[in-house]
Image (spheres, coloured by chain):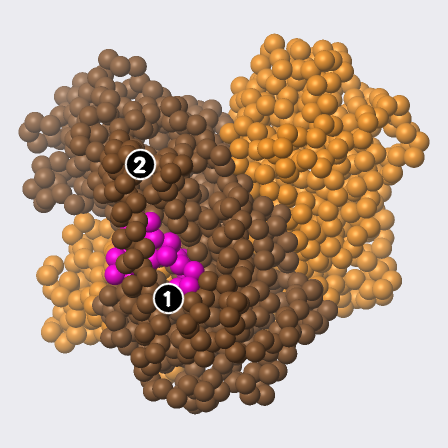
Chain colours: A brown, B orange
Amino acid sequence: MNATMQKQQARLQAPKAAAHPRVQSVRAPARRSVVPRAAAVEAPAKVSQETVDKCVNAIRFLAIDAVNKAKSGHPGLPMGAAPMSYVLFNEAMKYNPKNPAWANRDRFVLSAGHGSMLQYALMHLVGYDSVTMDDIKSFRQWDSRTPGHPENFLTKGVEVTTGPLGQGICNAVGLAAAEAHLAARFNKPDAKVIDHYTYCILGDGCMMEGISNEACSLAGHWGLGKLIALYDDNNISIDGHTEISFTEDVAARFEALGWHVQHVKDGNTDFDGLRKAVASAKAVTDKPSLIKVSTLIGYGSPNKADTHDVHGAPLGPDETAATRDNLKWPYGEFEVPQEVYDVMRSSCTKGAAAEEEWNAAFAAYKSKYPKEAEELEGLLSNKLPAGWENALPSYTPEDKGLATRQYSQIMLNALAPVLPGLIGGSADLAPSNLTLMKMFGDFQKGSYEERNMRFGVREHAMGAIVNGVALHNTGLIPYCATFYIFTDYMRSAMRMSALSEVGVIYVMTHDSIGLGEDGPTHQPIEHLASFRAMPNMNMFRPCGGNETAGAYKVAVSSRKRPSTIALSRQGMPNLPGCSVDGVAKGAYVIHGGEGTPDAIIIGTGSELPMAVEAAKKLEAEGKKVRVVSMPCWELFAEQSAEYKESVLPKAVTVRVAVEAGSSFGWERYIGQNGKFIGIDDFGASAPADILYAKFGITVDAVVAAAKAQM
Amino acid sequence: MNATMQKQQARLQAPKAAAHPRVQSVRAPARRSVVPRAAAVEAPAKVSQETVDKCVNAIRFLAIDAVNKAKSGHPGLPMGAAPMSYVLFNEAMKYNPKNPAWANRDRFVLSAGHGSMLQYALMHLVGYDSVTMDDIKSFRQWDSRTPGHPENFLTKGVEVTTGPLGQGICNAVGLAAAEAHLAARFNKPDAKVIDHYTYCILGDGCMMEGISNEACSLAGHWGLGKLIALYDDNNISIDGHTEISFTEDVAARFEALGWHVQHVKDGNTDFDGLRKAVASAKAVTDKPSLIKVSTLIGYGSPNKADTHDVHGAPLGPDETAATRDNLKWPYGEFEVPQEVYDVMRSSCTKGAAAEEEWNAAFAAYKSKYPKEAEELEGLLSNKLPAGWENALPSYTPEDKGLATRQYSQIMLNALAPVLPGLIGGSADLAPSNLTLMKMFGDFQKGSYEERNMRFGVREHAMGAIVNGVALHNTGLIPYCATFYIFTDYMRSAMRMSALSEVGVIYVMTHDSIGLGEDGPTHQPIEHLASFRAMPNMNMFRPCGGNETAGAYKVAVSSRKRPSTIALSRQGMPNLPGCSVDGVAKGAYVIHGGEGTPDAIIIGTGSELPMAVEAAKKLEAEGKKVRVVSMPCWELFAEQSAEYKESVLPKAVTVRVAVEAGSSFGWERYIGQNGKFIGIDDFGASAPADILYAKFGITVDAVVAAAKAQM
């Protein structure tokens, strides 16, 4: 330990200046000896502290070297968090690097995703095939498996995609909720077939984001005892020391949220402290655990540790050399001593043994509880039960028209009995979103086996939590709900669904000015356009019962693509021609299909009946008019050119689209000379029918728009 | 008090069941007598408790009657929060209903905006001209001044628009920050010209939203002692009792956030408790104050109080009659006894006197501190200083090209000295967003006069806080910054800027795959489209120094429309033709202006140079090509038809657009047969030049796209 490190260590031990009240009470114990401790909790006695230090330094230098080579990346967090992550990956966690898909593995989430090299270094050292040394060397390069932030869809063994801060800890809450749910449903007093922990490392940035407070409040409420979060408290963020903007008492906040909170005051060298904290966290079964771990960012770098310079930039050759010297690391660039591999890759043998043990236990469970085992195996297969779609009801024009949110409720309640994985709920709007599955109770502490989740008014966390539930990858099909306007609160989580290839079903009701009196703060205008522009997101706006069924059919089938279903507050008729199959094609003809029409009217959702009425008015005047329902642009874009031409023949340029939303994007289907009937300004507070009339979204307006082109 | 009310009162007093640990410790004092208390803090002695009760019931029944008449709305909160709001509006707050624009008024924010009838009832009773009895009777109707949620742009005296939960408390933090800033800049030891409180009523929903935790953490850090938030803790949300999803200890959380926390255990009848709590909150000057006020939602309704039925639906005639009976309210629908007006409208005389006193104090200040007074008056006029735009630098093609985030930094630092209202900062990305004004220090406890705000990693709160700063309406021009991708975290706040007509400047850097290695979690794709679709939002994507100056010129001038400026991480040249004036028109010709071209290439931001290069390649082959820069679609849409035709002649159908983002919406300008060069899928992690090549955003691709149409 050189002078700088001693100074850094002293900083950790000394009470902070009064300007930083948050850590005033933090005092590290006198520095411990580096002699191996016989009484180390959970540490295999055979691994000496010297070897542990080597492993930890191997993690650090893989990160340093990879970031240097990439000339880009974040070495600071891996250097500081290497000790805690070593304890997790080499001692605490149960997993098999050779089978990242083992259902009962412990889950690990690096919520501070910019520290991705920490995760890649660990995965490489413990023996994941997905992260070879070549992958490490191609960190942040085109076509590599080691992108700038961890990506679940690219690198096997990465559970969730992180980077946008706070998302990961919410995913971890979802993973822990999924575990709790499956355990409560399937475990027996004599057989715990689902029984694992969820670990998460998060940093100051995650802690500042509101989404993490939402999810952690809910995790505390739910009492998710097998969620263990390690807070890498290094006091550094990009703007500098966190004292310039973040001086709250995080530990006290988490206690207020109902968490079990511990503090490891020297996360750089106190391995026993880390081990004991993890053991204590495991022992507390009725509360999630937060372990605040005080560390030095960039630990080991003589000149950059404890500064924001080491957060997001390469150390560079000089400082790297100084750090090698300082940490007494004689090995070359990307060189890992065999001793380190020997210790770290014991995870493979330990993991394989654990998996084998579980397989045996599962076999015993299966023979004793064949019915439960069959259902669980069905879930774990991630396949949908045969014939599930037959549960979806169908409608005729004679059926009384309801609001599509009501049809959505019918679909959810029809699907729940045939889809054992369906689970979800609303952000405190269940009576408005109509999302309760009536045959189930609430997922709560003491009733985790139930399937109605009550998220509270926490939209953003809700989205990220259901991403975690889905990425538990055990057959659960989560849905979540709020008013469509409040997708603005959860957009990042929804985008993460799309990017991470997670088939979440977003049930979004009150989808237009049709909600009426609540006014412009609650009326979506640009939201359809904004989701149609988002990659890998199905944006549905169904009309009537059959199209709502069709939207659910695609949404449930789409396990790698999220679906957002925009649903009406107000009622609408079941139009002739509307069908489940039509929805699957994205757009289809519901009226006036034969021959070449004089005009095409395109409509969606609650405005589709207007399109039909307008067509009839025009037909009464001798025009030939086709009506196209377009509930999902993305699916239509994927159809063949022939199909597209059959629905929207290029020769027919007289086109009108009607939709109670922004015109933005509609030129794609109506052309530059077509007319759009909708609303490009904010709405207003008034009864819905008044709003439609005042904003000119009427049958007459559609008729006039068509005539203007004829 | 009838039997039901006694039961309800008993529930408040009794310890909760163990399932609800949060309120176990809450014990209300024995119910007080309704005899007037001589020692009431701040209560004018002449108002008897009987009269106070009448005023409070008048508030309740205006809310009940208006919601009944509208057949829509939220009576529950106004009924429960009427006592605390009476204490605020009739006793604690300093304001003049006859001049809602008085600069030194106390600010009030109803963060629980669904309880809008509380605010309207109060405003009507105390004498705001903007809320007449006719307005109350047209609650939630077309063209009324009493929309479903409070709207600052519609109803004079409403400070901010609320409804989306949590926004209001963040606005309140911004209002309090603005007060602290102006006070620190302009007050003198002998003259406090800016000296007011900011009050906020928020509910359980606001408390659950992450945005409120972000803002309240920052308010605690900043030590905003004149922010007083009253938490209407009624234990009811839409899904039912909050115990189904919200059992954290809110008071302890706020203590952890650095707030001064009090609890009024009986917010229904303990007026002295409310008065004392407000007085104590005022006395604590170095911390914001939270007063947790335990209330019954729908207080007074014999059958619906304390249930979610009263949250968001009319009481209906029977229950209204029962409530009238229960609260002994003999008056008819919309009837207010004169005695209530007499007491409540004393606010007008008190307020006028307070304003007059302030005017006199300001006159004295002006004669003693003429320079400061002149600057302050300039701010309060909400007018920009003459000639401010001359501070913007201009560039020639010979000037070395920088990244537009660097030009943005230059603009901010050029404007700061000439715009005394410019204030803002970044969500912990100042060194990346380049948003520091170098001549100023940090806005912090002890240095509120400084103008660099450090928001921490709290994007959503940042947006809502700067909305509050702007809506302080005292000449402050706030900007805020993060990576463009993280607009996904703050979209609701940005939409509230647009809806509320607030000219916030959103400085959004790293605007495309051009950011490179950080990968798809950090690369905006659909974001330009999603903001172009949003009403009343200028979405800029400038190229080079002159266009960045042009974007700032419009953004600063647009005090009623927010601007989002998408800025590059990477450098680009200063192209000939790029101009400040061109930006103001939204789109303009920068190359090949004369005559009718064979093709038009449209580009924005960092891809505009590609458009020019492609044009030159085509010209070398004998084609006549026009290049149009289109930095702001919204401004172009507002130009005359002639101007539009002069830039994009209809006759020229060979069109290519190039932009490193989604194609969505571009058919508006390139037509159905034009070609778009951009990216419709998520990006990837790799160096920027590799990404451009791999995703096919190249000069050659632009050339080929044009040729394919020729």
- Determine the chain carrying the residue at label 1: A
Residue B132 point in image, percent of width and height? 67, 27
B417 is higher (above) or lower (below) than B175:
below
Q: Dividing the picture into quarters, in which one does residue A262 lie?
A: bottom right
Q: Nearer the viewer, residue B520 or A305?
A: A305
The residue lying at 50 percent from left, 59 percent from top is A278
Using residue B7 as the reference point, say whether residue B688 is left or right of it.
Answer: left
Q: Dividing the picture into quarters, in which one does residue B436 lie?
A: bottom right
The residue lying at 61 percent from left, 21 percent from top is B66
Marker count (numbered): 2
Residue B677 point in image, percent of width and height? 22, 61
Q: Secondary structure at mark 2?
A: loop
A626 is higher (above) or lower (below) than B71:
below
The residue lying at 75 percent from left, 26 percent from top is B56
Position of the N terminus of chain A by quadrant: bottom right
Q: Secondary structure at mark 1?
A: helix
Which residue is disc 1 drawn over?
Answer: A119
A174 is higher (above) or lower (below) than A408:
below
What amino acid type is highlighted by mark number 2? Answer: Gly
Mark with earlier residue (2, 1): 1
Which label was assigned to residue B108?
none
Which residue is disc 2 drawn over?
Answer: A421
Position of the C terminus of chain A by quadrant: top left
Q: Nearer the viewer, residue B11 or B605?
A: B11
Using residue B488 as the reference point, say whether residue A38 is left or right of it.
Answer: right
What amino acid type is highlighted by mark number 1? Answer: Gln
Residue A515 point in image, percent of width and height? 43, 29
Q: Which residues are magenta?
A: A89-111
